[in-house]
Image: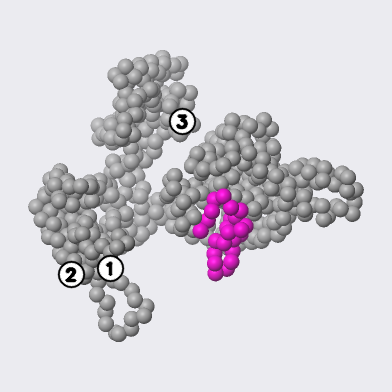
């Protein structure tokens, strides 16, 4: 998600008493208040009182002092307040984005309850770690320093390797800046982009330094990806790596149901405050009932039968407590721990099922009687095996051009449906583009198809690569008609066809059937990830970083004003 979209998301979710414009003005006023006090103490002996405040405002807002400061030193390079502020506020934005992904529209409430963090109070006034007495501002400043160390380290390594940004990388940066400029105008009313950056990050921030910051981060991540991708392995190395994890790279299809013992608890005993308690006998009875129901479900030998049986359970009469799930093509290494050994057993065949207990051993730090503590049962899983695939199939690469359905009607379930007329319009657009490609100078080539995609596709995420989707296999998270077309064993290089999905019509181009199997791709990806991390961790030990003058870093910022 771009920085502008993240800010828009937060703006929509956090209730504020002031408008966004007022928030920005308040933010600037807070900066001036803080900066004025510091600046006056330095120049009071030089400036006459009559013009002191005006001079302070002019010098502070010019960013001269911020750009001349040394806020941090990373690997021998000095970062001024503007440069460190980019890392500082982006660390805040990233943290909030992760929180929002977890808590959604209740983020502010959950942060207050779980983290003790009030999004409308200054970060420097809120403790993040009671043991060290670090504030949230301290936390984000330290995170900013670590991120700066990472970026500068990887940039230096990229330069030594003569690695440079690609044209697509540069276009991505241009696009990000353009989006920020639009955001500055339409959401905050700034016609001057530099003033917007100064208000958002730090006085002295401007398009030139902001672009440099984006370029450095893009170069760092691009080089790390390049290094990781460059790692290669022999068949012997691959064999050695997987000798103790052969099942980790199979794909398994199975169904499962979880029955918590709490689903079977009765009414219990309610006190005058409405609190409900249960006796040990009542809990034991609930556990026994859960086991009985789980055992009865073993009569189901297909997912459809299991799903039907679960829906008919008494515990699902008033509300859906238990639900049968059909888990397709789950990589062995990602199977649930409790079920993994049973599912991956070599003698497992279609229709095998089992009840697996979910239990834990409680810990009591005050208990030291030498006896092994009894395990406590939380519930039971019913697992139904379907199939296993060793993934020794080639992956494929395809290109596509999407013409989305337009219009539509959103139902109560949130899904959008389209009329036949709306679908027809999208199909006709796709058919016309297909004819345009067939008539292009040079013929029906992949290069011409990529040019057509770049200018006409509605899948903007893949436009720059000509609609490329690489290393597709049958367990990919793609819509079914799209996926089925790609993995058809009869598909040949150069095949072109229009395919309908829930998103619209796709003009598909089959580009390649790769030599490497999907299994080996999974293995080498894991090997690269592990080896790349080891390499990076060793490199990171070589770079130093320290914080210096933080006077101009907005530690009094609030997350709500972002």
Q: Quadrant of the C terminus?
A: top right
Residue at 62% x, 50% y is 557
Q: For the residue labelled by badge 3, is the local secondary structure a helix, a strand or a loop?
A: helix
Residue 206 falls inside the magenta stretch: no
Residue 115 spot, x, y in % from top left = 49, 58
Q: Foreground residue, 133 or 6?
A: 133
Report the mark closest to the observer, 2 or 1. 2
Q: For the residue labelled by badge 2, is the local secondary structure a helix, a strand or a loop?
A: helix
Residue 122 falls inside the magenta stretch: yes
Residue 166 is left or right of residue 198, and the answer is left
Q: Earlier in the sequence, mark 3 or mark 1?
A: 1
Checking the image for residue 281, the label placed there is: 2
Q: Is residue 241 above or below residue 281?
A: above
Label 1 environment density (alpha carbons within 10 Å; few <14, some 14–19, many ≥20): few
Q: Foreground residue, 496 or 339?
A: 339
Report the mark closest to the observer, 3 or 1. 1
Residue 464 is left or right of residue 398, and the answer is right
| Residue 167 appears anywhere in the view | no
Give the labeled residue for mark 3: 460
């Amino acid at each position: 998600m771009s920085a502008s979209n993240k800010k828009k998301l937060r703006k929509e979710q956090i209730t504020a008493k002031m408008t966004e414009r007022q928030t920005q003005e308040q933010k600037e006023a807070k900066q001036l208040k803080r900066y004025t006090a510091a600046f006056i103490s330095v120049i009071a002996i030089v400036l006459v009182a009559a013009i002191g405040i005006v001079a302070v405002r002019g010098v502070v807002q010019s960013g001269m002092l911020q750009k001349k400061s040394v806020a941090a030193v990373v690997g021998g390079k000095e970062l001024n307040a503007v440069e460190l502020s980019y890392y500082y506020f982006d660390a805040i934005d990233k943290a909030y984005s992760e929180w929002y992904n977890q808590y959604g529209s209740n983020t502010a409430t959950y942060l207050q309850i779980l983290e003790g963090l009030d999004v409308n109070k200054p970060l420097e006034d809120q403790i993040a770690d009671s043991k060290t007495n670090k504030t949230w501002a301290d936390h984000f400043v330290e995170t900013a320093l670590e991120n700066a160390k990472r970026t500068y380290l990887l940039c230096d390594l990229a330069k030594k390797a003569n690695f440079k940004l690609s044209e697509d990388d540069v276009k991505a940066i241009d696009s990000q800046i353009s989006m920020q400029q639009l955001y500055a105008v339409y959401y905050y009313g700034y016609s001057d982009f530099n003033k917007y950056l100064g208000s958002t990050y730090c006085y002295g921030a401007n398009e030139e330094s902001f672009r440099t910051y984006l370029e450095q981060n893009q170069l760092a991540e691009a080089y790390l990806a390049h290094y990781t991708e460059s790692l290669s392995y022999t068949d012997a190395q691959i064999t050695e790596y997987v000798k103790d994890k052969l099942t980790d790279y199979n794909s398994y299809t199975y169904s499962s149901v979880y029955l918590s013992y709490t689903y079977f608890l009765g009414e219990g005993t309610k006190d005058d405050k409405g609190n409900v308690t249960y006796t040990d006998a009542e809990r034991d009875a609930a556990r026994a009932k859960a086991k009985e129901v789980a055992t009865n479900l073993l009569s189901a030998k297909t997912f459809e039968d299991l799903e039907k049986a679960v829906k008919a359970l008494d515990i699902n009469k008033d509300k859906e407590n238990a639900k049968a799930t059909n888990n397709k093509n789950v990589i062995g290494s990602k199977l649930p721990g409790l079920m993994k050994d049973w599912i991956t057993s070599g003698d497992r065949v279609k229709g095998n099922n089992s009840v697996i207990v979910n239990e834990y051993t409680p810990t009591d730090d005050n208990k030291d009687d030498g006896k092994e503590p009894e395990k406590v049962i939380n519930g039971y899983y019913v697992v139904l095996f379907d199939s296993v695939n060793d993934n020794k199939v080639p992956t494929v690469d395809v290109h596509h051009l999407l013409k989305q359905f337009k219009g539509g009607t959103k139902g109560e379930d949130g899904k959008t449906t389209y009329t036949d007329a709306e679908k027809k319009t999208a199909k006709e657009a796709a058919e016309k583009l297909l004819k345009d490609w067939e008539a292009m100078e040079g013929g029906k080539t992949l290069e011409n198809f990529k040019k057509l995609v770049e200018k006409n596709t509605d899948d903007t995420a893949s436009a720059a690569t000509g609609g490329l989707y690489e290393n597709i296999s049958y367990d990919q998270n793609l819509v079914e008609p799209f996926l089925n077309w790609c993995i058809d064993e009869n598909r040949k290089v150069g095949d072109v066809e229009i395919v309908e999905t829930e998103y619209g019509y796709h003009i598909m181009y089959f580009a390649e059937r790769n030599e490497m199997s999907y299994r080996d791709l999974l293995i080498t990806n894991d090997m690269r990830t592990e080896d790349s991390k080891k390499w990076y961790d060793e490199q990171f030990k070589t770079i130093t970083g320290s914080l210096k003058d933080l006077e101009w870093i907005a530690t009094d910022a609030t997350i709500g004003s972002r």
